[in-house]
Amino acid sequence: MSAFPEKAKIVIIGLGGIVGASVAHHLIERGWDDIVGIDKSGIPTDIGSTAHASDFCYTTSHDYLSVWTTQYSIDFFEKMGHYARIGGLEVVRKGHDSWMEEVKRKLSSARAFGTRAHYVSPSEIKALFPLIEEDQVMGGLFDPDAGLVVPRSQTVAGKLVDQGEASGKLKAFANTPAQSLIVEGGRIKGVVTHRGTIMADHVIVCAGLWGRLIAEMVGEDLPVMPVDHPLTFFGPFNEFEGTGKEIGYPLLRDQGNSAYMRDTGDPKTTEGGQIEWGYYETDNPRMCHPRDLLEKHQARLSPSQRDLELEQVMAPLERAMELTPVLAELGYNESHSFNGLLQVSAAGGPSCGESQKVRGLWYCVAIWVKDGPGYGKLIADWITDGRTAIDHNSIDYSRFYKHQLTEKFIEGRCYEAAQKIYYPAVHTREPYATGRNVKRSPFYEREVALGGYFMELGGWERAHGYKANEHLLEKYGDRVPVRANEWDNRHFWRVSNAEHLAMSEDCGMVNLSHFYIFDVEGPDHVELMEWLCAAKIGGDANIGKGIYTHFLDDEGMVRADLTVIRMADRCRIIDGADAGPRDFHYVKRTAEDKGFTVTVTDVSEAYVTIGVWGPNARAKLKQVVADPAGLDPENFAFAAIKPIEIAGKTVSAFRISYVGEQGWELHMKYEDGLAVWDALQAAGIMAFGVETYANSRRMEKSLRLQNADLLTQYNLIEADLARPKVKEADFRGKAKHLEYKARDRQPAMLCTLVMTDNVDAAGVARYPVGSMPVVDPLTGAVLVDSLGRRSYTTSVAYGPTIGANIALAYLPADYCEVGRKLTVEYFNESFPVEVAAVGYKPLYDPENLKPRS
């Protein structure tokens, strides 16, 4: 071992696991050197999750990023000679019709995101996996690319570290735990260990189960938590004796029982001659805070392997024996069986990216083996280029609100996540039960009195519809379909579509207090926003206006979608609840990196917003404002912002519309909100739920949503949101934007699709949620553009005014033709769609006359 260095460009904490080793490898691949990796135990790890992981990889997921990282990782393992592409089965037991529906949904997601999973019959399952009782299953799927990292991911981690050391660009130090982090002026400066202190420009935390303890050193927390994963072994199983195989049969997932099993191959291989059966507890998962982890010398096996009582899993194990009787025939290997700790997330995905508090400190935690190399590449690209090839919004640590990083919140949400690792299926709109009622608007109690049907976003309770409005179904019932399929109807309230129609005929108000609002002020605030925004921000003519704009990244791809309000002394950013925290931190970091003198302040909880829209919005608002004439079109231009007075309160009125009707966004201080709401309600303005705003009318207006329709895989022109003229001032991504704009045509365009028949084979009308692959009906192939990007729906909702399901999807240039007939797949069944618009062209009020009326 070389002398412990005093300085490095990058220090990786947790080098011994597959994630840390993969990060080091990919950093070297990107040209980095002078990297130091430390680990609290051996390298490769002998105490982390990598040391005991089952090491299998499935590509099936309803999340594109997860599919991408797994596919990348599988190819990476295989190129290294450490992958057995044996395939993986997922079976459905007879009578479990709801899980067969989930398998069908997975098959559609597989098509959407580019995996090769396909349906298999009971006889095909038996042929692939002879240990199963054929009469116990009704079908399933087979993923031919699933398989096993061999002989162990632990071996791969060690090999990657050895290669890094041999290159001279990495130095590795085992048994060297980080004791503290050195931070000066908000930047990481070094890591303190018992071997000495090493100063560093960047520190990347890949410490897995111990990651939260490292974050705690700088006063942060990570929304992840270890949970017991029962792993049992049965044997001897000598079916593959003499073959030298690490695994003989395909992997088997019995997710309806929240379990899986696999053989361990030839008895002479690493862990051979056994059957491994694993289970994820759905009722009472055993969580473990990292501070309660044992040290190596205290644990019977290791700190990440806790003792298992067979009684803990007896009921699901007995069900497994019905499916695969071999488990009952073999002996139980108690000494090999244990509870293996793995990480679950409070937010549906890993925590990666730069610290919110400390520049240069990066996290990469809650990564499973199947994704390890993929995340190694993402982090290396991100820290090198400031971006990744695939949009990383769903894993970015900057996405978290402060309340989401409190211990109680993390514990509650992680417990829920642990209950649903394998079973039951998680709905696209699945709400959490814990961590609720964190933020309430000042009119929350009024919404409760109206019978609000609440969901949560960014901590805010948002009513999607109101029971008090259900009388509207008597008037609009023939235009508001009943959703007979339970999945389509889950977490949806029919009244919201009736509210949509009522608002569109008269007037309504919607609570938009979930908006993420932050102020940018200081000597350079205009210059900073001019650099960040694709639209023109500067100039006196823009003061008092709201400017809809986008942030692009250095490759000219769409990073953010927001409104900038130019005030006399600041820019106020109105952002979505989902994207807001990321954009807030991004603006702060950019200002620091570019040397702009500004202050960036989150004012989200100081202000609330009410949207008032409908053909009678002006007439209704005139009843409550102090100066009715001030609302007349000649006095209040479209996109203008002016102060008005309602109920004695000063309100900033922004004449804009996200629902395609005449009206205003009304912004006010939190403490003034209730008086304004009551005045509007007294004027007879109906409250309508956010479902109309965020989904049904948004789709009828073909409006794009950040992190769904707007992603860093696509440019602003493909999204059809580019302005006709590119501003003179320089801005991030301008050179690339001009390059794309000069093309004769774009490789793809975001198009509006209308489902022309939504009745399935059982005669049930369907109302899709989630992503669906877009298919050429002539070839049966999913559309793929010239850059290799697959076509799938990025948003979908039923539009009650149009009377059809409407979706957005990027289509290859050759398919961008109005009237083009295509199909989408939903629950593994094809439905016809037609291209209704190429680029931005609303189905409702296509000339956008109503908002300007």
Image: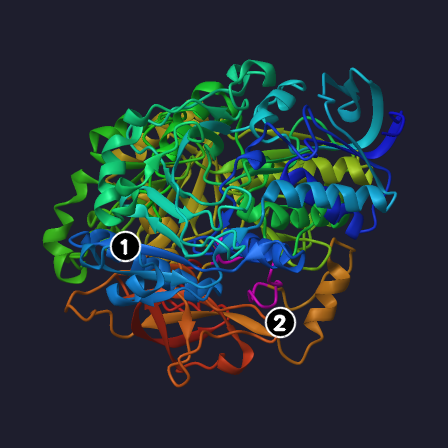
> Residue 517: x percent and y percent?
54, 35
Q: Magenta segment range?
A: 704-721
Residue position for label 2: 787
Residue at horizontal 23 percent and vertical 63 percent from the top: 766
Task: Pick whichever of labels 1 and 2 is earlier in the sequence.
Answer: 1
Residue at horizontal 69 percent and vertical 77 percent from the top: 743
Image-quadrant location for residue 702: bottom left
Residue at horizontal 30 percent and vertical 42 percent from the top: 327
Whether residue 502 is visible here, answered yes or no, is no
Question: Chief secondary structure of the magenta span?
Answer: loop
Q: Secondary structure at mark 2?
A: loop
What quarter of the picture does the C terminus occupy? bottom left
Residue 450 lies left or right of residue 373; in this view the side is left
Residue 807 lies left or right of residue 384; in this view the side is left
Q: Amino acid at mark 2?
A: Leu
Give the camera-side residue of 139 and 633.
Answer: 139
Residue position for label 1: 132
Q: Amino acid at mark 1?
A: Ile
- Label 2 crowd (10 A; few <14 / some 14-19 / many >=20): few
Residue 712 magenta-drawn? yes
Give the camera-side residue of 261 and 29.
Answer: 261
